[in-house]
Amino acid sequence: MKPADLREKSVEDLRELAKTLARDVFQNRLRNFTNRLDDTSAVRKSKRDYARVATLLRERELGIRAGNAAGDASAAEKPAKKAIKRAAAASAQPKESAGASSEAKPARKAATKKSSAKKSEAK
């Protein structure tokens, strides 16, 4: 499927196509798992087609228009892209502090030393 062909379709058609492709992805994975799929590249192809359709649906939901081949964003796209970046930054979760993981390591080492000392005493 070519992205240019998909862009010409309506939202309802894209939703229906997304359902069909999701079903195909599942069926191809199932057939591959049960060794009934002759062309294993069909799994990858169906996943990529589904991703293309899902991306177009998301673009239309956000009101983003396709950029030109050079990748320049139009004036209408720039605020939407900034909103996407802000939303992604807000949803990112903070990582654990390094102090918590380093405190657990000495406790494990001490526990292993005790157990090895007990084994040597038993001998």
Image (cartoon, rainbow, N blue to C red):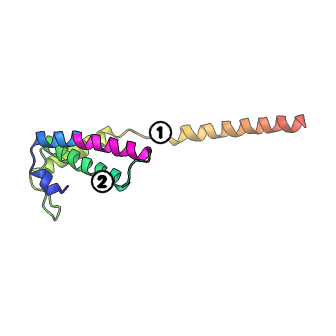
Q: Quadrant of residue 100?
A: top right
Q: Amino acid at mark 2?
A: Lys
* Magenta segment boundaries in residue numbering: 20-35
Q: Residue at x 38, y 50 (%)?
A: 37
> Which residue does the numbered mark 1 point to in the structure image?
96
For the C terminus, which image quadrant?
top right
Q: Nearer the viewer, residue 94 or 45?
A: 45
> Which residue does the numbered mark 2 point to in the structure image?
45
Q: Nearer the viewer, residue 62 or 87?
A: 62
Camera-near label (1 vs 2) is 2
Q: CA distance from mark 1 to mark 2?
A: 37 Å
Residue 73 in magenta?
no
Residue 26 in magenta?
yes
Q: Amino acid at mark 1?
A: Glu
Give the side of residue 101 with respect to residue 1, left or right.
Answer: right
- Sequence order check: which comes first, mark 1 or mark 2? 2
Q: Nearer the viewer, residue 96 or 41?
A: 41
